[in-house]
Amino acid sequence: MIDQLLKAADGPLKDLLGQTGGNADSASAVKETFLGVIQKQASSGNFDGVMEMFSGKETDPDSPTVNHLKGDLVSGLSEKLGIDSQKALSIASVALPMLLNLFNKKVNDAPLANEEIQESVVDSMKNGEKSGLGSVLSSIFGSDNNPSAIDLGGVIDLGKGLFGK
């Protein structure tokens, strides 16, 4: 599911990377590294990134969550792309809020209250519950009849992967 949503970011992310002097072809590395950072932090019990992704509120580029995630993203990008940390910081500073806001827009457009979605997603992921998570996420990402729908099974698998359930 997250992979599919991140795939939707390909065009805007490539444009963004091009505008900031980065290589547009590195978009997949940026998305993979972002996902790895979110998974790493959530698996260690830090849900700030996940909560921000599902807050439904615009993520400020200078927010504490962005600043917290940025260090790991910079490190991962430097390693994956073979670039210096200053260049990786430049990429992370613009890409991270954009990626977080992809999720926020979906949450904000959902019929449920943002706080309810955020709480339900995090609680379901922590507890490994599938049923409640599926209904909450279907309200966010749509149904299978929608061509832009997201595979909810992927979210459940992500939750199981993050939390070992």
Image (tube, rainbow, N blue to C red):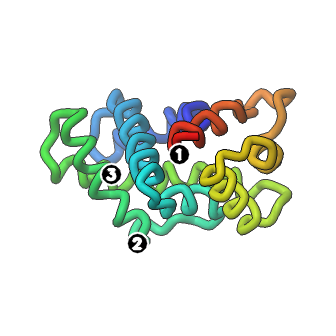
- The structure residue drawn at horizontal position 26% and vertical position 41%, both measured from the top left corner, is 77
Mark 1 or mark 3, whichever is nearer to me: 1
Question: Hey, what amino acid is under mark 3?
Answer: Ala
Q: Contact (CB < 8 A) between labels 3 and 2? A: no
| Residue 154's disc number | none
Q: Secondary structure at mark 2?
A: helix
| Residue 163's disc number | 1
Count neighbours of disc 3 (C-alpha within 10 A) and say few if under 14, some if 14 to 19, many if 20 or more.
many
Q: Earlier in the sequence, mark 1 or mark 3?
A: 3
- Quick check: 109 above or below 82? below
Q: Earlier in the sequence, mark 2 or mark 1?
A: 2
Residue 28, position as x, y percentages in the image: 40, 30
Count neighbours of disc 2 (C-alpha within 10 A) and say few if under 14, some if 14 to 19, many if 20 or more.
few
Q: Is residue 78 visible?
A: yes
- The structure residue drawn at horizontal position 62% and vertical position 66%, both measured from the top left corner, is 57
Q: Secondary structure at mark 1?
A: helix
| Residue 92's disc number | 3
- Quick check: 101 above or below 6? below
Residue 117, position as x, y percentages in the image: 73, 59
